Amino acid sequence: MPYGLYISAEGAQAQQKRMEVIANNLANVDTTGFKRQLATVQSRYAEAIEQGLDHPGSGSINDVGGGVQMIATQTDFSKSPLKQTGGRADLAIDADGVFFKVLKGDQEMLTRAGNFTVRSNGDLVTQQGYQVLSTEGRPVRVDPLQFWEITPEGAMRQNGGATPLAMVTLESLSQLVNVGENLFEPLAPTVDVPLAGRGVKRGYLEASGVEPTREMMEMIETSRAFEANVNLIRLQDQVLGTYINRALRTS
């Protein structure tokens, strides 16, 4: 089978995966605190070189390249614009690399989405219902029948007492894994952010990090690249069919 057929198929698959990432970004254009995902596409060596049967620069038939592949999906953690909502439990982090800590099942997760809600039982939760944690690692809870407020330092205050929300950072943002639902799983120990350096803004929310125009342009570019690879697959299939027919006629 023609080697170019495999290369074209690999290219089409990589562009399809890239389209899926872009489509997910567009679907979250209005999601609070959402961080844009980036598909990393990289060229690869021919299969023989990757298996150690040849080496780059050998000048042999194997030294022709192996197309492209999507090797990873990365997150753009750039800070997004803040929008004023006036909500009592709405919080925005006006600082880079700082996250709220929440509890999903028995796992501690991180999020930038501060559109919290106080339930009827007094629990401070995310939009998905996950409990927001305090610096002591316990769920933040208030008496919903009494007055409460969140301080500019990011602490839940009621009846003269204040419970600081757990807000953390990491040595490197590459130590975070996107697990969906606007949550990130830390792969390394987190570091508590002191009250003075949290950059919390009450009554604000961080907008999505997705710019629709840019994503649409990338979607068009990716669609054309996918279509070009599919056309190459079709063309090489036709060429292969022609060769087979000629071989059968002459045999």
Image (spheres, grey):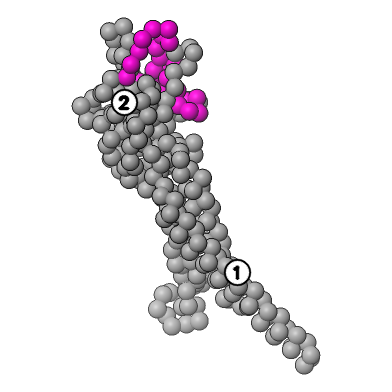
Q: Residue 72: x, y in percent?
A: 45, 54
Quadrant of the snapshot with the C terminus: bottom right
Asked if residue 56 lies left or right of residue 233, the reply is: left
Residue at 39% x, 45% y is 209
Q: Determine if the magenta segment contains residue 131.
A: yes
Residue 30 vs 144, above or below: the answer is below
Q: Determine if the magenta segment contains residue 248.
A: no
Q: Amino acid at mark 1?
A: Val
In 3D space, how far apart are the residues under numbered discs 1 and 2 (Cα atoms)?
51 Å
Q: Residue 14: x, y in percent?
A: 52, 61
Residue 169 vs 235, above or below: the answer is above
Residue 106 vs 225, above or below: the answer is above
Foreground: 115 or 178?
Answer: 115
Residue at 49% x, 48% y is 26
Name the residue tied to disc 1. 230
Name the residue tied to disc 2. 202
Mark 2 neighbour class, 10 Å CA radius: few under 14, some 14 to 19, many 20 or more: many
- Asked if residue 100 can be seen in this view, the reply is no
Q: Amino acid at mark 2?
A: Arg
- Asked if residue 245 can be seen in this view, the reply is yes
Secondary structure, mark 2, is strand
Foreground: 61 or 85?
Answer: 85
Q: Which residues are magenta?
A: 123-150
Magenta: main secondary structure: loop
Residue 35, picture quadrant: top left
* Residue 104 numbered mark, or none: none
Residue at 42% x, 80% y is 58
